[in-house]
Amino acid sequence: MVYRAIGVMSGSSLDGLDIACVEFETSGGRWKMQVLAACCEPYTEEWTEKLRSSTKLAARDYLLLHSEYGHYIGKALNRFIDAHELQYRVGLISSHGHTSFHLPPMMTGQLGCGAAIAAETGLPVVNELRAMDLAFGGQGAPIVPMGEKMLWGDHAFFLNIGGIANVSWTRPDGSVAFDICPANRVLNMLAAKLGQAYDAGGAIAASGKLHQALLAQLNNLPYYGKPYPKSLANDFGTETVYPLLGNSGVADTADLMRTYVEHIAQQTRRAMLMMLSSGGLTHAGNQRMMVTGGGAFNHFLVQRIAQMLEPLGIVAEAAEPNLVNYKEAIVMAFLGVLRWREEPTVFSSVTGAREDSVGGALWKPR
């Protein structure tokens, strides 16, 4: 059986709308996939600000933005389909949308109305991918482990360094995963102080000095001591971590970036120790870790993470560029296919929900 679906993802780093058209083939319970086309449509300054400030809106204005953003996504998808000559070749769209609120297990909010996307494209649309898991008492995050297990089973560990860094471990007795710490969202905010959109290759951070007292403050934030399953909202980075950096007394931005890179690396090691110990292990046995997300292009950050994990028997390596850039959009497309097939999209072992669930609302324009 062959399915062609488009996955759409807007990450917390607000760099743009990631779109991937993927062909999935299943045979004998195994899945294969091929990316037919992919792109990132950068946000204008206007859209960046609309999404960044969405949590401050009154309820009426928030719902208006939800609809407006859905139509925006639909029009972006139409341009993508036209540019890559995908007319009549796509059967389904699966849109994650842009996370605004995330307050598990009570609620989660992803902007981007599925009905508006369906109306613009004329195609069936799956969205609200996290909601059912929350209804079953789960964190609703991370939701990519299902795709990781089914599509890239030759890796045991997966690290995604986006606005928030998260990690997962595909184990025979059930996958486990959780959010580690804010990552690109904070690093990009620091880079903006120097007039840069991001720290290319990690060069700025590599030039800075490590401040141990600030590092200790960061590492002692209460979230890191909590057991998993657990997940983070975007505002942990913007309203807790970034102000802590700003009030630290460290004046040099490069020093702040160097210290924060070390924080991400140390918290990644801490997360892996927590995972391994839950399985009764102290060493992973030289298992591979796929590193994706925009942070995989931060060579200095990946180098520090790899150095931290090597003694634990974990070989961390950046994926090939297409996966680095579009892994989450690819997985969103896959989750849409699973929803269409009415198969589970979320592991309860990851989210802490009462049971696995078939997540996603389905909008059929005709």
Image (cartoon, rainbow, N blue to C red):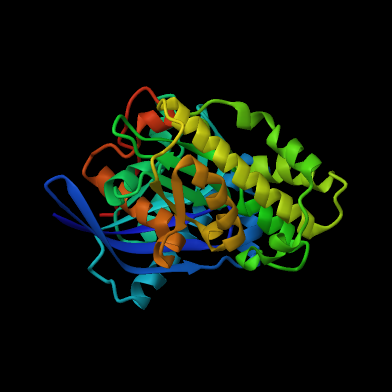
Residue at 57% across, 46% down: 308
Image vertical order of residue 338 relative to residue 71, above or below: above
How many marks do you count on the picture? 0
- Residue 272, image x and y in percent? 50, 37
Q: Position of residue 86 (x, y in %)?
A: 28, 71
Q: Quadrant of residue 35 in the image? A: bottom left
Q: Nearer the viewer, residue 278 or 253?
A: 278
Residue 155 at what x, y percent from top left? Answer: 34, 48
Instruction: Answer above or below: position of 23 versus 314.
Output: below
**Quadrant of the snapshot with the C terminus:** bottom left
Q: Residue at x 62, y 42 (%)?
A: 266
| Residue 343, image quadrant | top left
Residue 21 visible in the picture: yes
Q: Position of residue 336 (x, y in %)?
A: 31, 49
Residue depicted at x 36% and y 44%? 156
Q: Quadrant of the N terminus?
A: bottom left
28 left or right of 343? left
Q: Residue at x 67, y 48 (%)?
A: 262
Answer above or below: position of 338 versus 293.
above
The single residue placed furthest to the top in the displayed view is 354
* Quarter of the rendering containing residue 356: top left
From the viewer's perspective, is 186 left or right of 174?
A: right
Front in this rendered view, residue 335 or 227: 227
User: Can residue 101 be spotted in the picture?
Assistant: no
| Left or right: residue 29 compared with residue 92 | left
